[in-house]
Image (cartoon, helix red, strand yellow):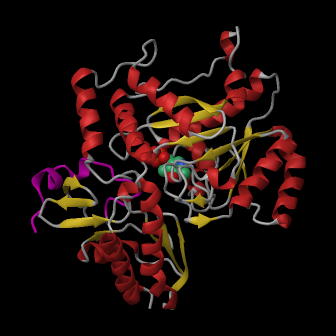
Amino acid sequence: MPQPTWLTENARNVWRPYTQMKTAAPALPAVRTEGAHIHLADGRVLLDGVASWWTAAHGYNHPHILAAMRAQLDTMPHVMFGGFAHEQAYRLAGRLARLLPGDLDHAFFAESGSVSVEIAMKMAVQYWLNRGERGRTRFLSFRGGYHGDTLTTMSVCDPDEGMHAHFSGVVPPQHVVDLPRDDAGEGSLDAYLAQHSGKIAAILVEPLVQGAGGMIFHPPETLRRLRRLADKHGVLLIFDEIFTGFGRTGSLFAMQQADVLPDIVTLSKALTGGAAPLSAAVARTHVFDAFWSDDPQHALMHGPTYMAHALGCAAANASLDLIEAGAWREDVPRISAGLEAGLAPCRALGGVADVRVLGAIGVVELKQAPDISALIARFVSEGVWIKPFGRIVYLTPALIAGDDDIARLTGAIVRVLKEAAP
Ligand SMILES: *Cc1c(COP(=O)(O)O)cnc(C)c1O
């Protein structure tokens, strides 16, 4: 099939993500999205198994989200947040405060997940400074974790998966340790913190699922262990729910399965249902209050140009309408059962190390790293969009995906892995 000229003529002008531009196959020209489907320029239609990097939770072009965005577009696509307030952001902050458990009530809006993690980290550092404690400039995070691609968020990612080697000397050194999965793990982390906690501003973790670092699950008890240790050693705890938030793991937020509160939570990805970029770092009241002062120096020192983008906030409010309507509460267990049944045959394959499912996340972990571009091309020939990384082949479909969609996606994985990892 001939490629569209807008693609061939400008291909070298566009820098693609995580891509060796010289050797990579051309990107697929997408021209339209609808529901769980992506339409290509040549007329092929792919069933999306990953919901555009986990964002399009309600499917693409959801009429309720598009209508809210159109109305906002006609009145005020955006206005600077430095000095102005707008209804969409204020309503969204109030709704997030009511939806999030406990006193996670104070939202700082940004435009990407990485930036919201940067903001959460700055909140933690300045929290201690405002309270007169100097020297808490480091973070403790976990192997297998992923928190973003900016230099400081890279520093708290898994050191191997996070490609730190390319950037040693630039990425600040942090404490990246093993997640405490049992009493022994909690004991070692306790001892580690006893030595280092005076220099640590916060512990950062993705609750229940470490996503882009390997789709690794941990039990809710691990989060209770972290809360206990953070309290004992007097450091803040940040939950990065950018992947897990808004129903993906079966509860509205993953933290609710452990019944613990972090001091700060970060949200993005499905926050707008995938229709616009938006993120938030939401703090509890004691964190917010550490900045509440007559001293201008105690203000949180951050302010992105597109902070609280009005169109993004309108999309998020519409997405929260759908979340509150609650179909996801039945959809996630239904999809979970479909993923479990559909992926089960992979367990019999020699090249498969593990098959695991949590909520609407289905993971097949291979023993060896496959040829990723060959796998993707095979999936495309099956009419599905599945984007493996490392040794991980996974599904995070839109929560509106039907049982037949889930069967098609898992069926494609079983067929393709029978060839690639027999
Ligand atoms: C995707 C992701 C990020 C980074 O978000 P971007 O919008 O890509 O900057 C951070 N943390 C987690 C857990 C993520 O899944």
Q: Position of residue 190 (x, y in %)?
A: 87, 54
Q: Position of residue 319 (x, y in %)?
A: 38, 42
Residue 316 lies, with reference to residue 41, above or below; the image says above
Left or right of 169? Residue 286 is right
Q: Position of residue 352 (x, y in %)?
A: 52, 84
Residue 69 lies, with reference to residue 401, above or below; the image says above
Residue 88 lies, with reference to residue 257, above or below; the image says above
Q: For the point 23% across and 32% down, which residue is it? A: 70
Residue 389 seen from this side: no
Q: For the point 86% across and 43% down, which residue is it? A: 233
Residue 14 seen from this side: yes
Front-lying residue, 201 or 281: 281
Residue 182 lies, with reference to residue 86, above or below; the image says below
Left or right of 57? Residue 365 is right
Is 5 included in the stretch rendered in magenta? yes
Is 243 included in the stretch rendered in magenta? no
